[in-house]
Amino acid sequence: MPKFEYAPAPESRSIVSLRESYGLFINGEFGPGVDGRAFKTISPATEEVLAEVTEAGPADVDRAVTAARKAYEHTWSAMPGRERAKYLFRIARIIQERARELAVLESLDNGKPIRESRDVDIPLVAAHFFYHAGWADKLEYAGYGPAPRPLGVAGQVIPWNFPLLMLAWKIAPALACGNTVVLKPAETTPLTALAFAEICQQADLPPGVVNIVTGAGETGRALVEHPGIDKVAFTGSTEVGKQIARACAPTRKKVTLELGGKAANVVFEDAPVDQAVEGIVNGIFFNQGHVCCAGSRLLVQESVYSDVLASLRRRLATLRLGDPLDKNTDVGAINSAAQLAKIRELSEVGEAEGAERWSPPCELPVKGFWFPPTIFTGVSQAHRIAREEIFGPVLSVLTFRTPAEAVEKANNTPYGLSAGVWTEKGSLILWMASRLRAGVVWANTFNKFDPASPFGGYKESGYGREGGRHGLEAYLDV
Ligand code: NAD
């Protein structure tokens, strides 16, 4: 099938006004770090330096926790829920007003296509604040008793794949329940969190209710290990999640962990092939595969294997890779040089272990971090590419004959975050859903999110739920 040539349609970046350098957002104000350290954040698509960002040390984290404690005790926890709701509604509306700016900023700093940041990330960010604003004055109806209490100060650490969306998943429920927060964004994508700090100022949020400290792993560690916090919420790798669980085990801190995944996307022989192929593509190439719940293992029923593979290859050849700010782009840049190295390494291991690698013809830009959409066939369950999270645009294809075999293979992983099932039979969907050990099971769709729907994992994908009524529990003393 010929690929249409599209004229470039770049979104203008003039709507974003970047500062040369950013301080820490503590007690409602931006200010310098105590020891004056800073790092640069770059555009992964061009390697251009976007801004310099302050690296918070332990003394800064301590100042942020102290500000959050003061705001918790004197302002936020004492405020009636309906008053807290007003602030959350205000934040949600400002996010909508500034949506285009936030989408451009997210694509610049993260490398994801503007089509995704504009149509998925930012609308979901606003939706999370609207949804939780609605809960703030109705917590007594959430099923946690007549007057559920907040926990106190939450220390929150988030990854780089959905920077502003992960912030919303953390901050919206925390504030709705009456907690105050200190949040650390990922070191490669701090800019939308800093824009959010400005939004807090714009919304007149009382000082100290939200504090943003930037930095890398050491800053995150100082935060989660700080004795002054009551609750730790972490999204990131399973390895770091385990370290945090160990560090918090001897303390009274309540912990929720959203970690890695290796989801199976299971296609049965009666599934409509074109629809399933769209779901497979969305499952693994959305956000360059930097998705914890990505459908990175495709399980296809043997009888339709060659049809599905042929359609999938045809569809992959039409994906456009390139400038994240171009509205026609389907696949953007890999977020960092380190992540690109990890994807390359595991792909090489896949080949060395005997799987067959395929990518459509695809020209990669010279500057920046890029990896073509890639499929591995002939994959066995023992291969590392079938077991380890690649966190990139790489799909491992396996086959099965019976539903029981599909369940066994799908569950043969240390993770348990999500799964997909493609079939026309409702009974088979229910049969599969009750047997798949995954926090979310999508039926005839993939990567669908809604603030009312709880999200979280089994096994090494972590514990606790975010979103929906269940997600409130993580921020209430119940
Ligand atoms: P990462 O664990 O290295 O980093 C995540 C965050 O933790 C970053 O902000 C980082 O600075 C911080 N951090 C690093 N070391 C720390 C430490 N010792 N103590 C406290 N904080 C520390 O992960 P990453 O490479 O940034 O993100 C990719 C991983 O995140 C993938 O494995 C992915 O599956 C997972 N993830 C999970 C979900 C989910 O909801 N389950 C969502 C997104 C990403």
Image: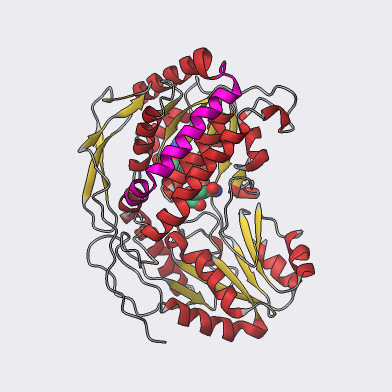
- Give percent across and percent down for residue 29: 33, 23
Is residue 333 visible in the rendered structure shown here? yes
Its colouring scheme is: secondary structure
- In the picture, measured across the screen, residue 404 lies left or right of residue 48, that is right
Vertical placement of residue 295 versus 125, above or below: below
Question: Which quadrant holds the N terminus?
Answer: bottom left
**Residue 22 appears in which quarter of the rendering?**
top left
Question: In this rendering, would 18 be left or right of 169?
Answer: left
Q: Is residue 248 above or below residue 375?
A: above
Q: Is the magenta stretch mostly helix, strand or loop?
A: helix
Q: Can residue 352 be seen in this view?
A: no
Q: What stretch is highlighted in magenta?
A: 77-104
Q: Nearer the viewer, residue 79 or 194?
A: 79
Residue 100 is one of the magenta-drawn residues: yes
In the picture, the quarter occupied by the C terminus is top right
Asked whether 452 or 447 is in front, the reply is: 452
Q: Residue at x 66, y 33 (%)?
A: 473
- The structure residue drawn at horizontal position 60% and vertical position 69%, both measured from the top left corner, is 381
Residue at (45% x, 39% y) in the render = 93
Q: Position of residue 451 (x, y in %)?
A: 58, 45
Residue found farthest to the top: 74
Quadrant of the image occupied by residue 212: top left
Q: Position of residue 280 (x, y in %)?
A: 54, 70
Residue 89: image location, x then y, percent: 51, 34
Residue 188 against residue 10 in the figure, above or below? above
Number of numbered labels in the structure image: 0
